[in-house]
Image (cartoon, rainbow, N blue to C red):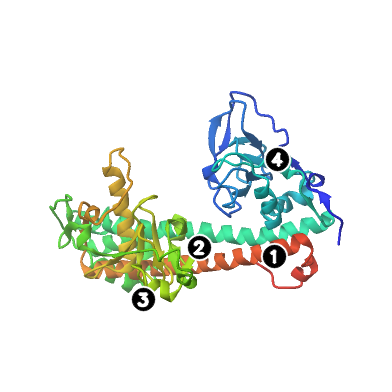
Amino acid sequence: MAADQKITEVVDFNPPRPIKRGAIAPFVDMAALAENQRDIAYVSEREFAGGGSRFRNGDTLFARITPCLENGKTAKVNALPAGSIAHGSTEFIVMAAKAPEYDEDYVYYLARHPDFRSFAEARMEGTSGRQRVSWQALSDFSFAFPPSDKRQIIGSILRKIDDKIDLNRHLNKTLEAMAQAIFKSWFVDFDPVKAKIAAIEQGEDPLRAAMRAISGKTNEELDQMPREHHDQLAATAELFSDAMEDSELGDIPKGWEAVPLSKMIQLIGGGTPKRSESSYWAGTIPWFSVRDVPDDSDVWVVDTEEKITETGLQKSSTKLLLEGTTIISARGTVGKLALVGKEMAMNQSCYGVIGTEGVGDLFNYFNLKESVEKLKKNTHGAVFDTITQATFETVLCVRPRHSVMKQFDNTVVPLLKCIKLNVFQNRELAGLRDTLLPKLLSGELTVSCVLNGEDVQ
């Protein structure tokens, strides 16, 4: 076992990164750092006024203020234009590797090490709610660092896991966008219906026009499709009418209705078991609150921070939500959505929402997502701070024929299943990473053990 060394043997804290005062440069605020995720969510631009943190690609940003530190806001900078220097929140401590060729990744994972985070939290100072740790306090941290070549391999092993997690997130974003685009085309822009109308006016085949609108294919590409796929596409196109009619929402496809959202859904309330009853908590039933809302592109919630017991479920007003139920946050952070990926309960700040009269789970989710956007627009700058049962009566929606809603669910279900699989895999990968991290960095698990085991890719 190597002897302990000061962290400053490996890490430079807040190294000089020159930016000219008044220059427009990349900027990262605290909100751009997700909890317990490596990558920065977004980078904006802002005039540099001379203060705050400064960093470049490869540096690690360590949130030093409560509750961001405790919540795990730590990121590795990797999204800046090549060669640029960025600035950011004054609440970041920048940790740079003295030898980037060996330690760029290692330093990031060191900042994620439970011992380092406990060390930082124990040295926070200031008034309650505004406590911070200084970089000088962090510089006193000591650790048994392995040789530089081992540090490089350790960082690489952990990076591969996070790379796979990031790849899955990007894939989920693409898949969710595809499903959202289909919903918008069918039920907001009415593309298949409009294509039929235009074809009739031009003396063309309306079914063929709708098939092109649904698939995005040309006539030549339609002719080259396998017969089975061609027939399935034609059957979908048949479901759409070839005329529009007036409604409270304006022109909508003939045979569809404009109805309040409340007519298409059933609401389920939540609740919180008594905190004073220990037998109600630390069970096996996931208990959802707003903090458990997944990233928009991940859609599904498959786990929660807190769990309750069967007794807690029975002795409170919360209810068990079935897989496929949509959860919408009604207070606090309002209008956040999640699809239930496994049975769970929830608190009273949310509604469980299921469809009625032929409204399937996936149509229900995307219809609610579209409705939330309408609600936000209708506030006209006012604060959108609560949703009640009456709210759902104020939003007019299109109710398509049952056959069209069913076909939508059938069309997008492969996309949503793939997203769910990626969410479950990312949960497993994050658990693997968090298990390996302290063992690798401390030397409890050697690099050779991992390299002789399964490849994380």
Q: Amino acid at mark 2?
A: Glu
Mark 3: few/some/many CA within 10 Å (<14, 14-19, 20+): few
* Circles 4, 2 touching at the beta carbon (< 8 Å): no
Q: Amino acid at mark 1?
A: Leu
Pick the front one: 445 or 5: 5
Q: Which residue is mark 3?
A: 228
Quadrant holding the C terminus: bottom right
Q: CA distance from mark 4 to mark 1?
A: 26 Å
Q: Which residue is mark 2?
A: 305
Label 3: which secondary element: helix
* Circles 4, 1 touching at the beta carbon (< 8 Å): no
Residue 244 position, x and y percent, is 16, 56
* Circles 4, 3 touching at the beta carbon (< 8 Å): no
The image quarter containing residue 354 is bottom left
Camera-nearest label, 1 or 3:
1
Q: Image point 35% across, 60% down: which residue?
A: 348
Q: CA distance from mark 4 to mark 2?
A: 30 Å
Q: Image point 13% across, 53% down: which residue?
A: 247
Q: Which residue is mark 4?
A: 135
Mark 4: few/some/many CA within 10 Å (<14, 14-19, 20+): some
